[in-house]
Image (cartoon, rainbow, N blue to C red):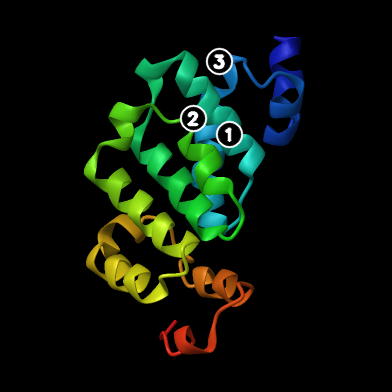
Amino acid sequence: MATEQAAENYTVEDLVALNPYNPDILNDLEKFVNEQVSSQTYNLDANLSLLRLYQFEPERMSIQIVARILIKALMAMPAPDFSLCLFLIPEHVQMEEQFKTLIVLSHYLETARFRQFWDEAAKNRQILEVVPGNPSLCDSLAFLDIPESSKACSC
């Protein structure tokens, strides 16, 4: 009982730092992903820990949570977070339509094909809308070295 109370005093970051492979923190990490979505925050380390735990316990994988993690990672462009997360997701999951779409969107951003990105994002709005704050993608794109010919893209 005392150890349960002590565990409640730890933040998710503490739990990840202390024991990232403990399956007992899986539920806390999933709740933390939802918290990141609602508060429009982002923690790559916690998300990577959750994806690693899903590798060890694939039967507990939540496709919704994985999608939210990938969308948050996509919003962190130009950082390589999306690729880091993708490497931890099984291929059969990546083959689901929503994940194929996110992979295509990531490719468009990585290759500075912004017009195609925004066209594809508009067509797949229902996938991206599960994570509010997508306009922050425009802020991320502002840091990229964009040639003059591409600046006509309406962000």
Q: Amino acid at mark 3?
A: Pro
- Give left or right: position of 91 versus 151: left
Q: In the image, residue 150 lies at what x, y percent?
A: 46, 84
Are the two marked residues, 2 and 1, in contact with CB atoms closer than 8 angstroms? yes
Instruction: Please tell me which of labels 2 and 1 falls first in the chain.
Output: 1
In the depicted view, which residue is nearer to us: 57 or 94?
A: 94
**Residue depth check, mark 3 versus mark 1: number of the one nearer the observer:** 1
Is 67 rendered above or below residue 51?
Answer: below
Label drawn at residue 48 = 1
Are the two marked residues, 3 and 2, in contact with CB atoms closer than 8 angstroms? no
**Residue depth check, mark 2 versus mark 1: number of the one nearer the observer:** 2
Q: Quadrant of the N terminus?
A: top right
Residues packed near mark 3 inside 10 Å, few (<14), some (14 to 19) or many (20 plus): some
Mark 3 vs mark 2, CA separation in Å: 16 Å
Q: Amino acid at mark 2?
A: Leu
Mark 2 vs mark 1, CA separation in Å: 8 Å
Q: In the image, residue 76 lies at what x, y percent?
A: 57, 57
Is 53 rendered above or below residue 150?
Answer: above
Q: Which residue is rendered at x = 45% and y = 46% of the image?
A: 70
Are the two marked residues, 3 and 1, in contact with CB atoms closer than 8 angstroms? no
Which residue is labeled 2 in the image? 88
Q: Which residue is rendered at x = 51% and y = 43% of the image?
A: 83
Element assignment for label 1: helix
The image quadrant that residue 124 belongs to is bottom left
